[in-house]
Amino acid sequence: MYSFEATLSFAQQEDGKDELSKFKQEFYFPQRNGKDAIYFCGNSLGLQPKTVEAAIAQELRDWQDCAVEGYWKAKNPWLFYQTSMRPVLAEIMGAKEMEISVMNTLTVNLHFMMLSFYRPTKTRYKVLMEAGAFPSDQYAVETQVRHHGFDPNTAIIEISPRPGEHLLRTEDILQIINEHNESIAVILLGGINYYTGQLYDIATITAAAHKVGAMAGFDLAHVAGNVPMELHKWNVDFAVWCSYKYLNGGPGAVGGAYVNEKHAADREYPRLGGWWGNEESTRFKMEKGFIPKAAAEGWQMSTAQVFNMVSLKASLELFKAAGIQKLKEKSVRLTNYLEFLLQQVKGINFEIITPKNCNERGAQLSLLFNEAGKEIHQQLTDAGIIVDWREPGVIRVAPTPMYNSYEDVFHFYEIIANIASKRLIK
Ligand SMILES: *Cc1c(COP(=O)(O)O)cnc(C)c1O
């Protein structure tokens, strides 16, 4: 049982004790009804840090003042712009710096990773993934499989929850891995399922993949900046993520990829190459012969897209200042508080489908409505709350520890309890 109270004074007391509470004022909140909205949509698009504008102005000024010399002479030299973000991301991902590459966008990175790690043979050609994976992942895998001349119907193995259940059981995932055994080329799962909020047991699944000789890759879109990872320790082969969700990198921000050291250090590892992935020492010699960096950055292609990276860089400074472990500690308590409060709501028929165990979830709770979900979503929106609706029946609520407070969570509860009591009277 939680030692929480459903009162404003309790929430305010928690905020008073929270050493991360000061980060809230580092962000701009969208305005609703003349005041800051209660923003629980950081799982979809993170808020703008107030430092971003100055960071963009800096790059504009360096471009004005230095022009081409900005690659070397800018305050943040553009040649190494992406590399400057590796230390914080390495910490967030539990990776070595050489295993991190800031580049492209998520789906593009997924294709490039699959190109290296999905090299099917006649007997080993299957990709294991979640049924109902995020559409972009589904399309990526479907087209990868077709690209290699296989039939998605036989080459893609989808894992579903048991009938009547919403979540995948690790034991079921392991059983399917054993069933398909040496026919599996790659296991590709979300780190956190975008719909249910379920965090998978990445260490166990990776070990099981390796046991049958398959590669283990993860889409960490809903993990990055939400739950700290230990990708290197878990021996994950590859991972990709976007930076505009919990990482607050702004719409369309540069994404990221992780390549395990054992592959990243291997210059012979198959890949598609471009000049930015080439060793810097020979990149500008303009000679024949691709010599990839012996690092995840050896998968880079093109000139750093500086303006796509500025906001992420500014945001990562805040992650560095707050500390990903501290954020995680707050996140567990904040989401537990939300769960506790939601359990007090009477009069609306909904179920929290996200796992109850805080080791099997991040910030997000998914509320499945058996009726009137869309209507309630609209009422929440009208009351100044920003949460999102995902078909067929879920409202996702993600209090993020970086900029949400216990008071935000309490006000959300007040509003949804008010909506519920009106429905009771009707
Ligand atoms: C958000 C999200 C994406 C988005 O991919 P982009 O290439 O950045 O548009 C992909 N997969 C998952 C699981 C996501 O949650």
Image (cartoon, rainbow, N blue to C red):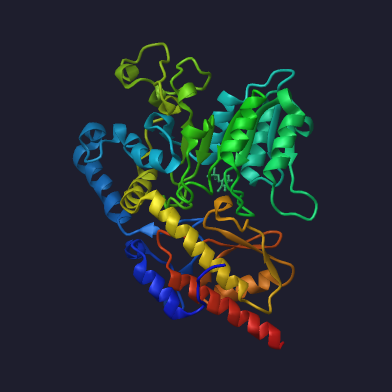
State which image quarter holds ligand 1: top right
| Residue extending farthest right | 163
Image coords of residue 126 (percent x, y): 71, 28
| Residue extending farthest bottom | 425
Image coords of residue 264 (percent x, y): 46, 24
Please indicate, yes or no, whether residue 399 appears anywhere in the rendered image: no
Question: Front-most of 272 and 183?
Answer: 183
How many tags in the picture? 0
Image coords of residue 130 (percent x, y): 68, 42
Q: Is residue 221 above or below residue 140?
A: below
* Residue drawn at (27%, 46%) of the image: 60
Determine the image quadrant of residue 343: bottom right
Image coords of residue 344 (percent x, y): 61, 76
Query: Is the N terminus in the top left, top right, bottom left or bottom right quadrant?
Result: bottom right
Please indicate, yes or no, whether residue 195 appears anywhere in the rendered image: yes
| Residue extending farthest top | 288
* Horizontal side of residue 336 vs 208, given as left or right: left
Determine the image quadrant of residue 35: bottom left
Query: Is the C terminus in the top left, top right, bottom left or bottom right quadrant?
Result: bottom right
* Horizontal side of residue 233 vs 380, given as left or right: left
* Residue drawn at (57%, 74%) of the image: 380
Q: Is residue 201 above or below residue 384?
A: above
